[in-house]
Amino acid sequence: MGKRRLYIQTFGCQMNVHDSEKIMALMGSSGYVTTDDLVEADLIIVNTCSIREKAKQKIYSELGRFRKLKEQRPDIIIGVGGCLAQQKGSEFLRKYPFLDLVFGTHNIHRIPEYVKNIEISRAAVISTDFQESVESLNVVAVPQNGKISAYVTIMQGCNNFCSFCVVPYLRGREESRALTDIIKEVNILADHGVKEVILLGQNVNSYGKSPGNGHDFPELLQEIGKIDDIERIRFTTSHPKDLSERLMTSFKTVDKLCEHIHLPVQSGSDRILGMMNRCYTSADYLDKVKSLRSICPDISITSDFIVGFPGEEDWDFQATLDLMKIIKFDGAFSFKYSERVGTAAIDIKKKIPECVKRERLQVLQSLQGKHTLERHALLIGNIEEILVEGFSKKCRDDMIGRTRTNRIVNFRGESELIGKTVSVVITDAYQHSLRGILL
Ligand code: 5AD
Ligand code: SF4
């Protein structure tokens, strides 16, 4: 039998993107190759997200497309995983009886075994139990096609229970990987030509804390910093309440740690932050930003915002805009509040009409757009250290890379620069990228 083909579709965050990479690696060891062409697939995996309603609707419409395919080719195996699969479990199989596999966020490592069983028995499998162990996190996905940047999961789950968020219900309690396992993985990645690692967790700042494993996040950063061929370390995401002085100091003490932090604030109103159960005030947040900037003046700070949280009045929204004007974030993701079943915020009475949410989102995004451009323009004339990632998709004569502060830079260059760190003088600033000249 020739190689079988896996088509994988991913929705949602970096965590899901990385889970899909792990699935590809696992299925690769079971004789599957990945394909971008749905028509030639023997196995289809849909890795789902449930963080907001919009993602959910898109996934449902995709599944409708796969129903038709299964009618034409009943031998094809179709599996659904990720947060929405975790949430829906057997309900998914009732609603979409053509599915062969529904697997949750803790069971990725078992997919090859499930697929093998389905190939033999054609009986559907549902696997959404939470596991105490972190076995699925220890699956190593070596990047394909000479990619120089790789994700490394350092922990799973979340104990914070922000009142709007489904993640703690769908990814379980916080559990950190052993430091030695992480170091082993980073060494394997370095041996395969990886130059940059992006450490992933819902709240990396509490790495090693609950349950305690004798290490903390700054220590992990220091240990990874000792691995020779790794040139850059990034991480995401950080909860402001857990951003310690020790971690902030790591930006000074760990040379390879890049000067960028994604620090979701969500709102600038203390009343809304309280209702969100975020455990900090806008003044606390401002203090942390001040400390970060005094320790590391060039640091780029990005954030997440939610507009239209239940009960958000005009003056609460104004407080968010005021905070933005003080901080001037380098970039931000912003979302309309999306009600999630099972979360605490569902019980807050005063819902915000869709048109108000839409308007607030527009105002916020246009202010952020202005700030991003302003912050980018400050870099014109600077000589930046760029780790070259590959060719630009828009123009084959251009190379693309990132500054240490995570800004995308396009410049004229040759393919042999891929994987190298070069100096580029910044000449132009745009909303989503910079342009420069190779020195
Ligand atoms: N509605 C809107 N945005 C949400 N986020 C998480 N849950 C919701 C929700 N129910 C946003 C937060 C978080 C980011 C990953 O997604 O801003 O930081
Ligand atoms: Fe969700 Fe809050 Fe945990 Fe982030 S910290 S995953 S927003 S509960």
Image (cartoon, helix red, strand yellow):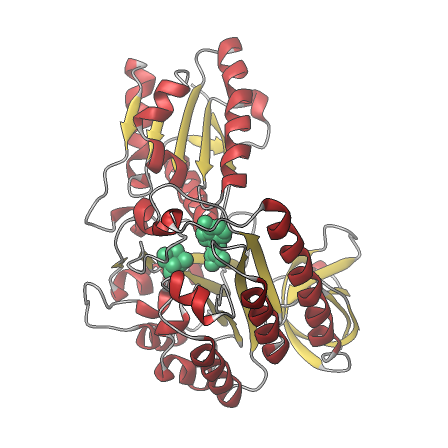
> In the displayed image of the protein, which residue is found farthest to the bottom?
294
Looking at this view, is 271 or 119 the one in front? 271
Left or right position of 85 against 65:
left
Q: In this picture, is 26 found above or below 233?
A: above
Looking at this view, is 398 or 126 the one in front? 126
Residue 241 can be seen, yes or no: yes
Splitting the image into 4 quarters, where does residue 300 fall? bottom right
Splitting the image into 4 quarters, where does residue 302 fall? bottom right
Looking at this view, is 345 or 10 the one in front? 345
Seen at 46% across and 77% down, the residue is 285
Q: Position of residue 74 (x, y in %)?
A: 45, 11
Seen at 41% across and 53% down, the residue is 164
Q: Position of residue 27 (x, y in %)?
A: 39, 35
Quadrant that contains the N terminus:
top left
Looking at this view, is 4 or 138 the one in front? 138
The number of callouts visible is 0
Seen at 49% across and 63% down, the residue is 266
Q: Position of residue 367 (x, y in %)?
A: 69, 67
Left or right position of 347 against 68:
left
Seen at 68% across and 61% down, the residue is 363
Residue 202 can be seen, yes or no: no
Q: Position of residue 218 (x, y in %)?
A: 34, 77
Left or right position of 37 against 113:
right
Left or right position of 327 against 103:
right
Q: In this picture, is 295 found above or below 316?
A: below
Q: In this picture, is 131 found above or below 111?
A: below
Q: Quadrant of ligand 2?
A: bottom left
Quadrant that contains the C terminus:
bottom right
Q: In this picture, is 240 found above or below 266?
A: below
